[in-house]
Image (cartoon, rainbow, N blue to C red):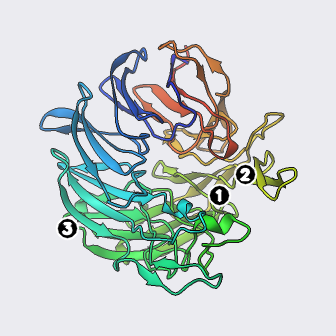
Amino acid sequence: MKWVFAFPDTAVLRSQPAVYRGRVFIGSQDGSVYALDAETGCVHWTTTVQAEVRSGITVAEVEGKPALFFGDSSGYLYGLDGATGKQLWKLRLDEHAAAKATSTPMFYQGRLYIGVSSLEEALSVAPAYVCCSFRGSVSAVQATDGKVLWKTYMIEETPKPQPKTKRGSAVMGPSGVGVWTAPTLDTDRDVMYVTTGDNYSDPPTPFSDAVVALQMSTGRILWSKQLTAGDAWNSSCYLAGKVNCPDSDGPDFDFAASAALVSLPNGRRALMLGQKSGMAYAIDPDRRGQILWQARVGKGGTVGGIEWGGATDGRNFYVALSDVAFEVSLKPGTNDRLYELDPKQGGGMFAFRIDNGRRIWQTPPPGCGDRRPCSPAQSAAVTAIPGAVFSGSLDGHLRAYATTNGKILWDYDTDREFKTVNGVPGHGGALDVGGPIVAGGMLFATSGSAQRNGLPGNVLLAFGLGR
């Protein structure tokens, strides 16, 4: 450990830092954005945006100067001056009130490519809410001024009233198909690939739970490959009465992980995919998404399967398994359900050959021991470097696995108090969503996720090489 930085008024950290020319750029739950010295953690500047910094941060040279680009939980995309933190522009990606920007913007030749997702499926728990009217989309945005160059919806038709559900609830649709993930750019072919979410209401549509290929220059949809059909689901499906649950009552097997584009030994190419269904796939982007291989790693679920992303070193595809589970009980004297993390279910690390899907190794989770609340689930995105792959766990541990055999090389328990460089009380917790960043011989990871009764925390940890 070289240094630790703590964020005030924070219990959940979901963004991913970026490292550029000796600076670490990081956003937090309260909307603060910091530029830190990578060697010391000292603050160069700080600024505040409208809401929680929800996407990862992208750094790019624009007109010869560094700029930061990221999205927040209220659906805005920002451009900031990298040297000062001054806001260059701000863009609302979608006019829907529940829109949010979880998709990390991808920069190429002066343009940003970004998707938009939403919170609307959670709003459906209110019995009077008429679900749903949000449509996911992908946009190309001019990096200099935030001008939208094109926008393509993942559902072609505008939502309209639909037949009532079998439970008698009013319905709007089709809806959903949010893009939670960073697009994958195939610049040689002017193509980008996005993975998509589920439908929120009936009727289901063909681009949900899919990989969609778009032309980068125009936004025109070229082809799509749906991995789970008929998946219409919203948070009302959790409730005993399922008041606003679609009749489809899908498994909620959408994608929260970006695709990884790789070259195969036979000269062909593949997109590596990890889905909440608990499945890993390789599909052929040059044959309209033909499945090359598929492998199961877990049972999957709403917060199960492969959550926020795998990684590849060009030989293997590495994925961590979430399959977080809950112990359900009734609150004494009421019919209200209480959900506590199950300390005995979930987690594990897997490696597959990219060419044929053969499992190279599987490493089970070490387990929670006596820690409570705790889950061994590994839902955070993983990070690969030559020889090692890093995975954070909801149990508070950050681990490095050998790429050859899955042996745990290094294990650091972040669920502890830390002395911080900025003097703010710091404590680690569960690791979720954004994975660690490795740059300049250092590893940077955020720790803390109070979501779903998990371990809260508020720190950015900076590790250097041992001496």
Q: Is residue 277 visible?
A: no
Q: Secondary structure at mark 3?
A: loop
> Given contact means CB atoms under 8 Å apart, are the residues at marks 1 and 3 in contact?
no
- Image coordinates of residue 257 in percent, x first then y, are 49, 56
> Given contact means CB atoms under 8 Å apart, are the residues at marks 3 and 2 in contact?
no
Residue identifier under label 2: 346
At label 1, the amino acid type is Gly
Position of 202 with respect to 21 (left or right) is: right
Residue identifier under label 3: 218
Decide which of 31, 349 is in the foreground and name it.
Answer: 31
Q: Residue at x 65, y 45 (%)?
A: 405
- Furthest residue in direction right, as rendered: 333
Residue identifier under label 1: 304
Decide which of 230, 128 is in the foreground and name it.
Answer: 128
Q: Secondary structure at mark 2?
A: loop
At label 3, the amino acid type is Thr
